[in-house]
Image (cartoon, coloured by chain):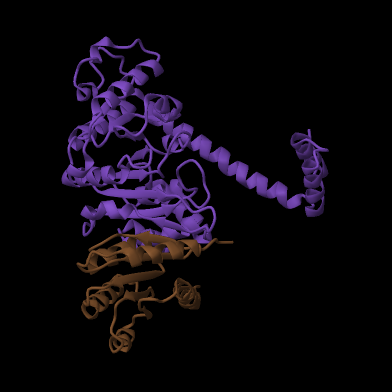
Chain colours: A purple, B brown
């Protein structure tokens, strides 16, 4: 086992930070270290935090991390910001809102640029989370880029996905368009001290009722939003009712309720068997995408670059449809059907 | 093959509340293809060293306008060394009297950039010093 791995398992933040860099840079040491660490993973609860820009995701992560620390749990944070498509550089500013967490050895924050990856996360996020998991953090908070509508990769990475909304940011139609509501295990209405919070909560509740297979529960209407935070006793245990939690992250208001909602979701995942199922689905997706990557590289290496250009020319000239072009390329390496 | 990206922490230690210059530098470094971790105002040397450690940066840029550079800069250097990060390059920007520049450099500050320095100069300096130590 490498020094990096033993140091990381012994709690060295320097080793963890260095491994995260290796993972991001696809350094040869990363794969070996991750393989050695893999048996040490699977213990942390992974909480995704996503939502439109300006909803207060970083502040929410800050407050949640403080609450977990107060409860004696250690917290790893991955905060993802977009890479500029023009320069390849990035400004990673999420630490600005997390200054309350400095000076605490039980918290580790890492900023990560997307480096061209779409979907709200970086390509390296999954492996980075695994490194934090192996390092022994109890809870790992994963903050996506300011996601709008289709950035739903986080739901595959996290056990519990928080979708953060704020009053007055988008009207109901926006929220419907955003398939992002469907990935929410907990809906957070942050900035709940601002005007319009009740109508935002109402709109979200209506959408949740529309989106689910269950009959709309009249019971929830007219009750304070936070009363729906846990599945009611008469619900089947295999069915999770997405709660809506109101918070004011900058003041820490509602964070205890949110923490309980996350806890309840975690318990639900365990008791319903969903945890194992989701892990397995995630692992299958990961196997598929890694296989795709390797196969693509191997096939691409065997294709004659001159032929590639010639076929590309034909596609550009509209003489050859892309699907037929692929077949022609595969024929030349003996892989066509 | 590895795709190495330079990571730079831009921090604003001390109590003065002006971060315009720091933001201009942050943007220029991003436009030069670097990943810039921007931590905002009023950072203590401890906060800066901790962020540098967790973010595994190649360079720390300190923006200091308060006149406290002779106290803040060596403290940051000391904490970085204590974290086994003595190889991280530290640059200082801001209002620094000429006579202090050689003193800062003798302490281990990689470069000092005063008002009016072109962002290109800073980008080139970073590329050069980090290139020197890149494995």
How many tags in the picture?
Answer: 0
The quadrant in which the N terminus of chain B is found is bottom right
Task: Please state the horizontal and vertical placement of residue A283, each as a whole percent of the image.
Answer: 48, 37
Q: Which of A204 and B106 is in front in this view?
A: A204
Task: Please state the horizontal and vertical placement of residue A178, each as a whole percent of the image.
Answer: 44, 29
Answer left or right for B100 relative to A111: left
Q: In this view, does B57 lie above or below A279?
A: below
Residue at image point 82% right, 43% down:
A314
User: Dividing the picture into quarters, in which one does residue B67 lie?
Assistant: bottom left
Is residue A253 visible in the rendered structure shown here?
yes
Residue at image point 80% right, 38% down:
A318
Answer left or right for A163 relative to A324: left
User: Dividing the picture into quarters, in which one does residue A207 lie?
Assistant: top left
Is residue A6 visible in the rendered structure shown here?
no
Task: Please state the horizontal and vertical placement of residue A20, each as a whole percent of the image.
Answer: 42, 57
Q: Nearer the viewer, residue B71 or B78?
A: B71
Task: Please state the horizontal and vertical placement of residue A325, each as a whole percent of the image.
Answer: 78, 39
């Amino acid at each position: 086992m490498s020094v990096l791995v033993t140091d990381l398992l012994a709690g060295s933040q320097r080793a963890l930070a260095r491994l995260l860099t290796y993972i991001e840079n696809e350094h040869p040491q990363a794969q070996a270290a991750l393989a050695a660490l893999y048996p040490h993973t699977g213990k942390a609860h992974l909480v995704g935090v996503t939502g439109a820009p300006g909803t207060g995701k970083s502040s929410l992560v800050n407050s949640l991390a403080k609450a977990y620390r107060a409860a004696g749990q250690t917290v790893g944070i991955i905060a993802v910001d977009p890479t500029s498509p023009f320069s390849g550089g990035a400004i990673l500013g999420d630490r600005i809102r997390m200054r309350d967490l400095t000076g605490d050895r039980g918290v580790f924050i890492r900023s990560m640029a997307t480096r061209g990856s779409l979907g709200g996360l970086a390509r390296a996020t999954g492996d980075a989370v695994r490194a934090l998991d192996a390092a022994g953090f109890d809870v790992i908070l994963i903050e996506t880029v300011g996601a709008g509508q289709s950035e739903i990769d986080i739901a595959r990475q996290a056990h519990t996905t928080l979708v953060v909304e704020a009053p007055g940011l988008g009207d109901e139609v926006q929220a419907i368009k955003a398939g992002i509501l469907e990935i929410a295990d907990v809906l957070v209405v942050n900035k709940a001290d601002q005007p319009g919070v009740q109508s935002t909560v109402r709109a979200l509740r209506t959408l949740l009722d529309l989106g689910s297979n269950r009959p709309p529960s009249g019971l929830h209407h007219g009750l304070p939003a936070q009363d729906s935070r846990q599945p009611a006793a008469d619900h089947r245990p295999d069915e999770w009712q997405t709660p809506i939690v109101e918070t004011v992250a900058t003041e820490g208001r509602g964070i205890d309720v949110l923490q309980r909602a996350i806890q309840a979701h975690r318990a639900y995942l365990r008791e319903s068997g969903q945890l194992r199922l989701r892990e397995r689905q995630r692992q299958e997706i990961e196997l598929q995408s890694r296989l795709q990557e390797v196969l693509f590289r191997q096939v691409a290496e065997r294709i004659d670059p001159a032929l590639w250009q010639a076929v590309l020319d034909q596609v550009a000239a509209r003489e050859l449809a892309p699907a037929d072009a692929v077949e022609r390329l595969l024929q030349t390496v003996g892989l066509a059907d | 093959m590895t795709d190495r990206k330079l990571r730079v922490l831009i921090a604003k230690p001390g109590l003065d509340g002006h971060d315009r210059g720091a933001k201009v530098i942050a943007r220029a470094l991003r436009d030069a293809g670097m990943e810039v971790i921007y931590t905002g105002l009023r950072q203590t040397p401890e906060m800066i060293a901790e962020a540098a450690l967790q973010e595994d940066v190649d360079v720390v840029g300190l923006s200091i306008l308060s006149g406290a550079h002779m106290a803040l800069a060596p403290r940051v250097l000391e904490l970085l060394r204590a974290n086994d990060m003595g190889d991280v390059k530290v640059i200082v920007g801001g209002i620094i009297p000429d006579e202090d520049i050689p003193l800062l450099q003798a302490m281990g500050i990689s470069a000092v950039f005063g008002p009016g320095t072109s962002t290109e100069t800073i980008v080139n300096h970073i590329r050069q010093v980090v290139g020197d130590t890149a494995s």
